[in-house]
């Protein structure tokens, strides 16, 4: 039997519009995983934000986190692949007027714990972004004036800017001129704001999928995604599918369009596609 690795994005794809996993998706995934379904997640969410979904779904295959910065095995809490942010570019975020004029949020790792650093908040959008995350990080959420003055022992992962489409698009224009950096523009599927993740050019969902494909020794990879940061992995996969609520750019490059995330589209497709799902 062909060894197929199924990889799904979370927000806007596997998750329902309210950001939850439906009981049908949860129960069906658990059942199929017991039948040796190879399934995992590739998400823009970070280590902390992904943990509860991995637990709920009983996923044993390593997950792709933070747009490909990390491949992490939750079964034994081991990071299998890490592409940190290049330290030499931190001064850019204080010298470039467009970047220094906004707060920015830096995520960093130490002893398997995520830290969130941010400069003084300057806009309502930044305040909203921070308030939705502050409780998650508790004593690991730290205000600073300069990203170059981080405590020792931290591994910088990525920087986020949050705001209107025009604001983050302008920032992306600056970042795209730097070969060593990579940026992904995303719409917040739960409100009208946009955000841009900035990280090492060695990190992306598609590059991480290639690495994971080799680790698992899969014969084919099937991916599911809905947003701009999924375009690369949709192209990279053997086959790719997008929910009906996906952005048009994703629909144009996918193998096919499936039911929306309000109809459990991903898991209903896998039910039909997975060879091991033989009715009793």
Image (tube, helix red, strand yellow):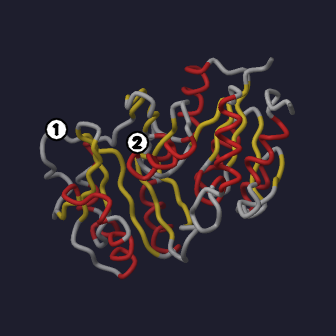
Which of labels 2 and 1 is toward the front? 1
Q: Considering only order in the chain, which callout, 1 or 2, is on the residue closer to the N terminus?
A: 1
Whole-percent x and y of residue 67?
A: 50, 46
Residue 35 appears left or right of 205: right
Tell me the element at label 2: strand
- For this rendering, which residue is in front, 152 or 100? 152
Whole-percent x and y of residue 66?
A: 45, 47
Q: Which residue is mark 2?
A: 200
Pick the quarter of the image with the C terminus. Answer: top right
275 up-or-down from 265: above or below: above
Residue in the picture at 74% in, 47% down:
267
Residue in the picture at 35% in, 64% down:
133
User: Crowdedness of circle 2 by 10 Å Cα count: few (<14), some, many (20+)?
Assistant: many
Q: Would you identify the image quadrant in which residue 129 lies?
A: bottom left
User: Crowdedness of circle 1 by 10 Å Cα count: few (<14), some, many (20+)?
Assistant: few
Q: Which residue is mark 1?
A: 153
C-alpha distance separating marks 2 and 1: 19 Å
65 up-or-down from 185: above or below: above
Q: Residue furthest bottom?
A: 124
Q: Residue furthest front?
A: 280
Mark 2 and mark 1 in contact? Answer it, CB < 8 Å. no
């Amino acid at each position: 039997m062909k060894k197929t690795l199924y990889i799904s994005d979370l927000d806007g794809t596997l998750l329902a519009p309210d950001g939850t996993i439906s009981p049908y998706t949860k129960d069906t995934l658990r059942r199929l995983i017991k039948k040796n379904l190879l399934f995992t997640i590739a998400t823009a969410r970070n280590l902390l934000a992904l943990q509860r979904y991995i637990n709920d779904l009983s996923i044993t295959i390593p997950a792709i986190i933070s747009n490909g910065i990390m491949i992490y095995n939750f079964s034994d809490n081991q990071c299998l692949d890490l592409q940190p942010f290049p330290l030499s570019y931190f001064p850019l975020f204080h010298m470039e007027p467009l970047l220094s004029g906004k707060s920015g949020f830096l995520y960093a790792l130490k002893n398997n714990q995520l830290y969130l650093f941010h400069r003084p908040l300057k806009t309502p959008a930044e305040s909203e972004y921070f308030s939705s995350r502050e409780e998650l990080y508790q004593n690991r959420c730290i205000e600073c004036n300069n990203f170059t003055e981080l405590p020792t022992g931290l591994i910088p992962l990525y920087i986020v800017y949050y705001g209107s489409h025009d604001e983050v698009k302008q920032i992306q224009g600056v970042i795209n001129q730097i070969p060593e950096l990579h940026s992904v523009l995303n719409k917040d599927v739960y409100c009208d704001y946009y955000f841009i993740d900035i990280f090492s050019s060695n990190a992306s969902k598609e590059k991480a999928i290639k690495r994971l494909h080799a680790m698992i020794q899969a014969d084919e990879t099937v991916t599911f995604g809905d947003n701009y940061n999924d375009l690369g992995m949709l192209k990279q996969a053997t086959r790719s599918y997008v929910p009906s609520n996906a952005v048009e750019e994703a629909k144009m490059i996918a193998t096919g369009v499936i039911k929306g995330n309000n109809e459990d589209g991903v898991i209903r497709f896998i039910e039909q596609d997975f060879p091991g799902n033989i009715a009793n």
